[in-house]
Amino acid sequence: MLSTTGAEPFVPETTSLKTLSHAAEGCRGCPLWADATQTVFGEGSRTAQLVLVGEQPGDQEDRQGAPFVGPAGRVLWQCLAEAGIDRADVYVTNAVKHFKHTTRGKRRLHKKPNAAEIEACHPWVEAELRAVRARAVIALGATAARSLVGSNVAIAGSRGARFDLDGRPLWITYHPSAVLRADERAAEIRTAIVADLRTVAAWLGE
């Protein structure tokens, strides 16, 4: 029987990212692990100044075992560079650690995690935030925002606002995958992401 107990029983009491990542490989807190190639944990230094939380691993992330290594990741790293944020100062992770998808022929198509799956995986995000004492956090997209804020958030209406996340500032912006899906609005959304990242970079530089 597939577990739906949530990740909490699998999360060790530690601030070691290496230990947390190893423990996450065995997480069975929700059914998503069964169809995924592997757990995709966060990456970066525990001394990072900024934590970026996305939605979930994509096809390439699931295959390679690392976050933001696919097309959306390329957009993200380009936007960070444009905003003047050093990659070494960033810890990147996802609200959900397994790739949720449906198969169509040989293609594996992304499926949005539901509320129960986001909640089940949240203890891993909390553990990462305890381990990485970054000065600020950015939620990339609606799934990440829901994981961190605890309720559904409209991205367009939340951009520019600073939320409190257990004493740390939290900003919300679009997920870089939105640039890839947006067609005629792609340039507009990309510009918005860079602008939001620059806002955070300016705050970090104060």
Image (spheres, rainbow, N blue to C red):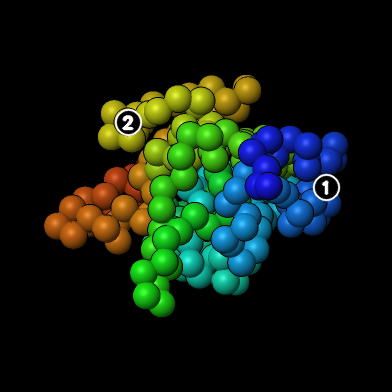
Vertically, is 19 above or below 151? below
* Mark 2 crowdedness (10 Å alpha carbons): few <14, some 14-19, many ≥20: some
The quarter holding residue 79 reads: bottom left
Task: Determine whether 172 is above or below 82 in the image.
Answer: above
Q: How far apart are marks 2 and 1 (CA)?
A: 34 Å
SS category of the residue bearing label 2: loop
Question: In the visual, does 94 lie left or right of 103?
Answer: right
134 with respect to 18 (left or right)? left
* Amino acid type of the residue that numbered disc 2 sits on in the rendered structure: Ala
The residue pinned by badge 2 equals: 154
SS type, badge 1: loop
Residue at 61% x, 66% y is 37
Check disc 1 and report the residue beneath it.
16
Count the marks: 2
Residue 138 point in image, percent of width and height: 50, 40
Residue 18: image location, x then y, percent: 80, 55
Which comes sooner in the sequence, label 2 or label 1? 1
User: Which of 156/195 is in front?
Assistant: 156
Q: Position of residue 189 (x, y in %)?
A: 26, 50
Pick whichever, 41 or 3, lies toward us. Answer: 3
Which amino acid lies under the numbered mark 1 shown in the image of this protein?
Ser
